[in-house]
Image (tube, rainbow, N blue to C red):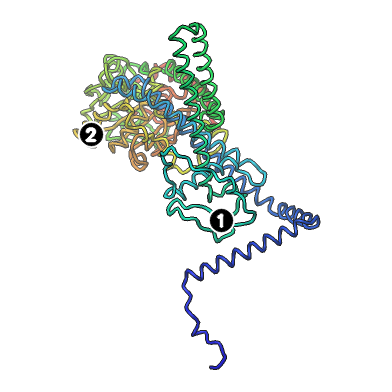
Amino acid sequence: MGGQYDANTSPPRGPNVLLRDAAVGYSNRLKSAYKQKDRVLATAEGREEELHAYQSAHGTWRFYRTLCQVRFGYLSFLVVMVLLMFSFTLLMEIFFAIFLPSAKYDDYYTVRAVVSLILLPIVLFFLSYIFEEASRLFVDALNKSDGSLPNFRLALAVVIHYLRHRTELAEPEESGDQAPVDDNANEGGDELRRTRSSRTGILHQRTSLLLTAKNDPFLDDDKEEEDEAWERKEAAAEHAQAQAIEATETRSARLSAVGEVPPKKTALNRWMRAKAAVKTTLLIKKKRFPQIFGRAFRKFISGFVVVSLIFFSSSFIIGTFVTGGSFKLGPFDNSTELVSNELKTTHGLSASITVNGKIISFDDTSEYAACSVSYDGLSVLDLALMADAVYGTTTEIQKDAMENRFNGTELEDWKYVARNNESTDGQNWMEVYFPAVNMTVIAVRGTASATDALEDMHFWFGICIMQAINVFVPFLKQLPRAFVVRLLSMNLISAIMPSPVFTDLLNHAVDTRARVGDNLVITGHSLGGAIAAMIGAKTKTNAVSFSGPGLLYSLGRFDISAQDVRDYVLTMKPRKDIVPRVDELGGLVQEIRCKRPSPMGCHSTSTHLCELYFSCGDPRQRNWSTNEKCIEYGNLPSGDDDDDE
């Protein structure tokens, strides 16, 4: 080939050599670019040109940066809200584990209370740190200046440093010898920095200019020497302080032994030392740990106390004024004239049915779809009467209510089977069997006291807080439902929580379901309605809830599925009633009219009974004509916007 160059005869070059050459070449080009940039900025014209370029770029990207900041700010706000809701719910759960009335019936109440009190400071410490960091993230996200997020980036840099170098971080040696600090370590001008690897202890030079920059506060490389020097300095200061304190105490003890120091002065010295220790502790807390029990967390604690007082007061008011079980019907009379008059009053004249061999005019379509729902012969009105009867405070009152409402009808052979243990069970209920239709009904009492109201708040406190804030700042729908369900489930502390108040009722429902099969219906009003719906979904049993709270955000707390709620639960929801707006209703939901002006009036059992009677009628021919509550309700004007009248 003569003098021609043959590429095939060149020595092979390995991948390591190519990578090294590429790194060196890139570093040299970058170094040249930096030097050229420095020469340009050294002149006034260059600096002015750079300033104009920055201003132009800043104006071009202003809208995009604002949009990104809004999105990031809203994300950080959601993080703060999630932590706020979690903190509210967690602290309230710990409170209920100690002070809830039903918790005192648990066998391990004393142990649980002691453990909860011990864990409370640890929980507050943890929540304060997380809360302060989330607050910093939100405040930094609102900062519009260039290079914002200083506090959050600093915390993030520490985390990244640990994750990147956790295998290289060596424990400090316990030897008392201290390595001398080289004062000339930082000298050398533009020379590359030299560092010691904690793995091999070999000094080597960095080959990349990017890894040698000293002016980036978030660069984690080559910080080992500074950390070691800081640790040595702190250890020396602590050792000197300990020696000084020990020498002072020894001298004071010797002087006291020979009687050279008066007792008053000795006590004064002790007081001064204690005062100095307190000041030092507060200073360390302020300087070294600003993210623990900071200002934002202290405001959160104050807000938690205020909100808790509001909820407790509301629970007391609701528990004091809610009544039930006093609904009385007139003497039973199944004459054709009475039945015809009642049906005309409630439905007008339309289609007909046969009652006692007589043809009675009857509306062919009821006002509500739920009017046609039948559970093997039991109507929604029958279940509403039982949900009201269970409010009786004693067994005799409950039986009297059942006699007044079912004796004289085809269901008069009912049997009172069982009720809750009045001395230990926190949830009141009764079981009634109807041989005529071979159906068993478990009726659960709702909120009838301040204790019941506290039980309500125990189960739905977290979602109540979230929905209350969501009225002013709509954030709840921005969070995945599954995430909110898991957040409110409180599985984190389920091991130390007492058994739920409905445990005995749930066990009884399971046993009854095994005994009677599908011939079982569970019903209740208010809290009783929600408990009935929950047990119905849990045991796959038909359930009818009257003005009960929803369950879809509390699925994790009750360990039920949304599909079971959809398949087995029917909820009667009066308009203007605020209780069914708690959480979110699932399954079949029948909204009914409420003529009463107040939400408390719409929530009462008499509203359900009177509205169902006027809208659905009563084919069992009970005498409603003497009931004063229904007479008053029927005379009220309808205030609904969608009413046909």
Q: Is residue 227 above or below residue 326?
A: below
Q: Is mark 2 on a helix, strand or loop?
A: helix
Can residue 451 be spotted in the picture? Answer: yes
Q: What element carries label 1?
A: helix
Q: Nearer the viewer, residue 107 or 636?
A: 107
Q: In this view, does 51 lie above or below 480?
A: below
Real-space CA distance between mark 1 and mark 2, rounded to the nearest whole angstrom? 71 Å
Q: Is residue 215 above or below residue 387?
A: below
Q: Where is residue 538 in the image (x, y as percent from the top left)?
A: 30, 36
Instruction: Specify which label sits upstream in the sequence, 1 or 2.
Output: 1
Q: Which mark is residue 211?
A: 1
Left or right of residue 62: residue 76: left
Left or right of residue 4: residue 315: left
Q: Position of residue 644 (x, y in %)?
A: 52, 34
Near mark 1 (Cα within 10 A), the count class, few <14, some 14-19 or many ≥20, is: some
Residue under the point 48% across and 6% down = 263
Which corner quadrant of the image does residue 375 belong to?
top left
Which corner quadrant of the image does residue 337 belong to?
top left
